[in-house]
């Protein structure tokens, strides 16, 4: 992959990988993960993929990320704001990756 070839992933593969990772997180941390932090450094996701410029550093907040994920679960079907909701999920997943480090 790379070097001029398209970089693609099947959504089914991504879904399976995330399910396996979340199963491993459950095994390590239990049903509730104590994120043990709130604020974190973040860069805009679009800026993260533009290597021609230095990204601006901003702050994210895990409590806001968690609230958004919980709120997403109460929305009507079809009320998904994909880019926005994924950014909040990403903040949580990044924190879990830090907690899982040896």
Image (cartoon, rainbow, N blue to C red):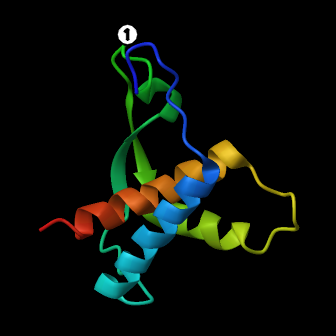
Q: Residue furthest left?
A: 102
Secondary structure state at the residue bearing disc 1? loop
- Residue 41, by quadrant, is top left
Measured along the vertical axis of the image, is residue 57 above or below residue 14? above
Residue 54 in the image, given as x and y percentages of width and height: 33, 17
Question: Which residue position holds label 1?
Answer: 52
Residue 19 in the image, given as x and y percentages of width and height: 51, 70
87 lies left or right of 40: right
At 60% from the left and 46% from the top, the residue drawn is 10
At 54% from the left and 54% from the top, the residue drawn is 14
Measured along the vertical axis of the image, is residue 77 above or below residue 91? below
At 62% from the left and 67% from the top, the residue drawn is 69
Residue 64 vs residue 54, the one in the foreground: 54
On-image quarter of the N terminus? top left
Residue 61 vs residue 84, the one in the foreground: 84
On-image quarter of the C terminus? bottom left
């Amino acid at each position: 992959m790379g070097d001029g070839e398209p970089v693609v992933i099947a959504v089914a593969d991504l879904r399976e990988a995330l399910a396996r990772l979340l199963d491993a997180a459950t095994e390590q941390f239990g049903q509730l993960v104590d994120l043990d932090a709130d604020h974190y450094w973040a860069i805009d996701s679009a800026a993260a993929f533009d290597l021609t410029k230095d990204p601006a550093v901003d702050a994210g907040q895990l409590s806001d990320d968690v609230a958004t994920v919980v709120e997403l679960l109460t929305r009507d079907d079809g009320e998904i704001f994909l880019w926005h909701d994924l950014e909040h999920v990403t903040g949580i997943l990044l924190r879990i990756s830090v907690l899982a480090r040896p």
